[in-house]
Structure formats: C-alpha cells, structure tokens
Image (spheres, rainbow, N blue to C red):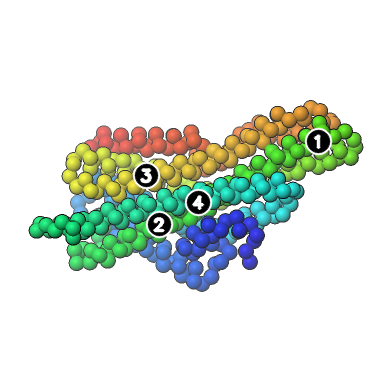
C-alpha cells in the first residue's frame, strides 16, 4: 500500500521504478530487474580490472584504469545500499505522512506544497543535466562514424572505446557489442545516481519544510500575545502552539538523523571513492592535454570530473540547507516578542533556545559535516592529491 505522502514524490517514484527500487512496489519483477542491472554494472567494473592481467602495470596505466573503475564502483555501492535500506525509506515516508496528517491550517499545507515544488524542480533540473551528459557522450562516440559518412576518407579510423576494458574476445570484431555494454552501464549507472540522489534531495527538502513549519508556528503563537488580550484561555492555546512547534522541530531533527545514520556507510564510501576518482581524473585530463595525443580521450574523464563535483556540491548544498533552516527556527525565536509571554510559556521557549547551544548538522561518522565549507574542503583535497600524483611522475 502506498502512503499519501508518495504523491509529493511522483517524479522520484518514476525514476526509482526504472531501476526497480521504489519501496512501495517491490515485486518479483523488480527484484529480477535489480539483479539484471546490478549484473551489468558489476561486469563492467570487472572487465576494467581484467586489463591488469594482459597489460604491463605502469603507474599511468593503473591511474587510467582506476580513474574510471572507481567511478563505476560508486554506482554499485549506491545501488546496493539503497536496496538494502528500501524499507527504511518506506518507514521514513510513513513517518513524514504521520506528521503531515497533524498539520493545523492551510498555511502549513502551503509550506509543504512549496517545498515539494522545490524538490520537483531540483529533480527535473538534475534529470535534464544527466540526459544531456549521456547524450553528449554518445554523440562523441558516434561522431567519427558520422564524419566518415559525410566526408568519406580512404584512411581507416581506429575505433576506440570510451574506457579501457578486457573482455577476452576480439574487441575489433565485437566492438559494437562491447560499446553497447559500456553505454548500457553508463545509462544504468547514471539512472541509479540520479534516482537515488534526487530521492534523498526531495526528502531533505521536506525536512526543511518541517523546520519552516516550526518557525511559522512560533510566529503564529507569539503574534497572539500582541493581537489578543492575554487570558488564561489564550495562554493555554499559546502554550499548546509552542509545544507543537517544539515537537515538529524535534521530529524534523529525528528524521534527519535517521536518514544520515542509515546511509552513513554508503555516504562514507561515496565520499572516499569520489575524492580519489576526482583526483585521478584530474590527472588524466592534465596528462592528455600535456601529451597532446588522443585528445578525443579527454571527454570521459571530463564528464566524470563534472559529475563528481556536481554530486559533491549537491550533497553538501542540501545538507547546508538543513542547517540553515534549523538556524532560522532559532532566529525566529529570538526575534519574536517571547518576553511578553507568561513565565511558564517563556520556559518552553527557553527550552527550545537551549537546543541552539550546539549546531545541528548532517554528518558522516563525525569526519564529514555536510556544508558548503565541506564541499570546498573535498575539492581542495582532491586537487591536493592530484598534485601529489603529478609530482611523483
């Protein structure tokens, strides 16, 4: 059975259905779909590492293989971890629905709709970006064939794969099948990263909406002090409003912590492999440009660098967004006229203010704190590792 909250995730549902991971429709077919896609992803990685069996393992060769293989490995890691935590995602959506069922007025529902719309906009934008990247890669692969048709030349052009692989077959004879397998891997991997990434982004946006509702409830409660005559009845209603604001703020924090705790291992692996892959691909680009030969090989590492930086930025940007919305709750509390409220109401407000003694952030094992500063640190670390690799050449 699908909870009502799923209507806010319609686009994410469609994307997750394409890779067999929508938590509300897990069937035998979706499990077979998962196994089939996972098989394509893992074999693509395996056939990259088998190149070590038939080639001399020089430093440049190792960097060239790892620069793409590690990036493809992130597809598998994210696919497996999300499949393992599918029930967790379902439970989180159910908890979100339970909170939405308790919303009090149309203004709070409007806040939910606004943040749901923001999530859909981000999903559409990232989907378009992914489609354009895949289209550019496929066009670049087919472009030499198009040129040969338009301007035929007597000199035969060597056909190269976008990445180095070893299938233990005649790669010239079965070039089309190998290229089809690699392109299928890229499309499936991109779908995995896009579907899971946008789902997490949409969920985080809804958590930000809960923080916004908390701010709204505080403003609404304190405005009653100024606009209405203070009476026992009004005091009771105001106290209940404050309690509801504190409660939804607490639930938003718990939902955020649950999300990060369940996907902590996945995020740690993605961050580690992402930094290493970014460093190696920066080195690949620099080496190709420096040598000047086979300049057409620069497209694959360039796309990997672009995708890695974009993914790091999105992860840290939306984590920073959660922190900012949490801080806005306390800014709201400081700015309202809470000192005009009765003493027992002030005590509840002070309890809320005490939570601001320590910043609320989304982190991974205490090592990485999601923020724009962390994004800059990760990029800086990647560039530093790139310079170390270059200095050893």
How far is disc 3 from disc 4 in space, using C-alphas? 18 Å
Helix, strand or loop status at disc 1:
helix
How far is disc 1 from disc 4 in space, using C-alphas? 39 Å
When the figure is inspected, residue 193 is found, relative to residue 252, above or below; the finding is below
Helix, strand or loop status at disc 3:
helix
Location of residue 308 in the rendering, given as x and y in whole percent from the top left corner: 39, 45
How far is disc 2 from disc 1 in space, using C-alphas? 53 Å
- In this figure, which residue is indicated by the disc labeled 1? 224
The tag earlier along the polypeptide, 3 or 2, is: 2
In this view, the mark in front (3 or 4): 4
- In this figure, which residue is indicated by the disc labeled 2? 189
The tag earlier along the polypeptide, 1 or 3, is: 1
For this orientation, the residue located farthest to the right is 232
**Residue 77 visible in rendering:** no
In this view, the mark in front (2 or 4): 4
Residue shown at 18%/58% (left/top)?
A: 150
Helix, strand or loop status at disc 4:
helix
The tag earlier along the polypeptide, 3 or 4, is: 4
Residue shown at 25%/58% (left/top)?
A: 142
Query: Which quadrant of the view contains residue 7?
Result: bottom right
How far is disc 2 from disc 4 in space, using C-alphas? 17 Å
How far is disc 3 from disc 2 in space, using C-alphas? 15 Å
Location of residue 35 in the rendering, given as x and y in whole percent from the top left corner: 44, 66
Residue 306 tag number: 3
Q: Are marks 1 and 3 in contact (CB under 8 Å)?
A: no
Dot 1: within a 10 Å radius of its alpha carbon, few (fewer than 14), some, or many (20 or more) residues?
some
Which residue is at the front of the view, 47 or 341?
A: 341
């Amino acid at each position: 059975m699908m909870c009502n909250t799923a209507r806010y995730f319609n686009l994410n549902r469609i994307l997750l259905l394409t890779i067999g991971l929508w938590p509300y429709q897990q069937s035998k077919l979706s499990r077979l779909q998962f196994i089939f896609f996972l098989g394509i992803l893992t074999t693509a990685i395996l056939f990259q590492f088998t190149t070590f069996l038939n080639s001399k393992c020089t430093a440049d060769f190792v960097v060239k293989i790892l620069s793409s293989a590690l990036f493809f490995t992130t597809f598998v890691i994210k696919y497996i971890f999300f499949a393992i935590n599918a029930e967790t995602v379902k439970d989180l959506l159910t908890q979100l629905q339970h909170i939405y069922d308790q919303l009090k007025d149309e203004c709070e529902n409007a806040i939910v709709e606004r943040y749901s719309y923001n999530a859909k906009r981000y999903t559409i934008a990232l989907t378009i970006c992914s489609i354009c990247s895949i289209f550019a890669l496929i066009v670049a692969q087919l472009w030499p064939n198009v040129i040969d048709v338009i301007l035929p030349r007597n000199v035969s052009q060597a056909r190269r794969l976008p990445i180095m692989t070893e299938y233990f077959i005649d790669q010239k004879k079965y070039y089309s099948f190998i290229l089809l397998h690699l392109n299928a891997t890229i499309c499936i991997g991109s779908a995995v990263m896009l579907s899971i990434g946008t789902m997490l982004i949409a969920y985080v946006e809804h958590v930000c909406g809960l923080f916004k509702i908390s701010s709204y409830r505080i403003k609404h409660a304190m405005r009653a002090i100024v606009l209405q005559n203070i009476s026992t009845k009004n005091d009771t209603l105001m106290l209940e409003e404050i309690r509801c604001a504190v409660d939804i703020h607490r639930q938003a924090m718990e939902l955020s912590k649950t999300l990060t705790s369940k996907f902590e291992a996945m995020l740690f692996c993605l961050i580690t492999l992402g930094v290493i892959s970014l460093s190696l691909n920066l080195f690949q680009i620099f080496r190709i440009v420096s040598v000047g030969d086979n300049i057409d090989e620069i497209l694959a590492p360039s796309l990997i660098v672009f995708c890695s930086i974009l993914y790091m930025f999105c992860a840290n940007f939306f984590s920073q967004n959660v922190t900012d919305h949490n801080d806005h709750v306390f800014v709201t509390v400081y700015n309202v006229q809470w000192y005009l409220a009765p003493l027992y109401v002030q005590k509840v407000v002070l309890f809320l203010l005490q939570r601001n003694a320590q910043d609320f952030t989304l982190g991974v094992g205490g090592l990485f704190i999601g923020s724009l500063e962390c994004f800059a640190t990760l990029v800086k670390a990647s560039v530093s590792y790139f310079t170390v690799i270059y200095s050893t050449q």
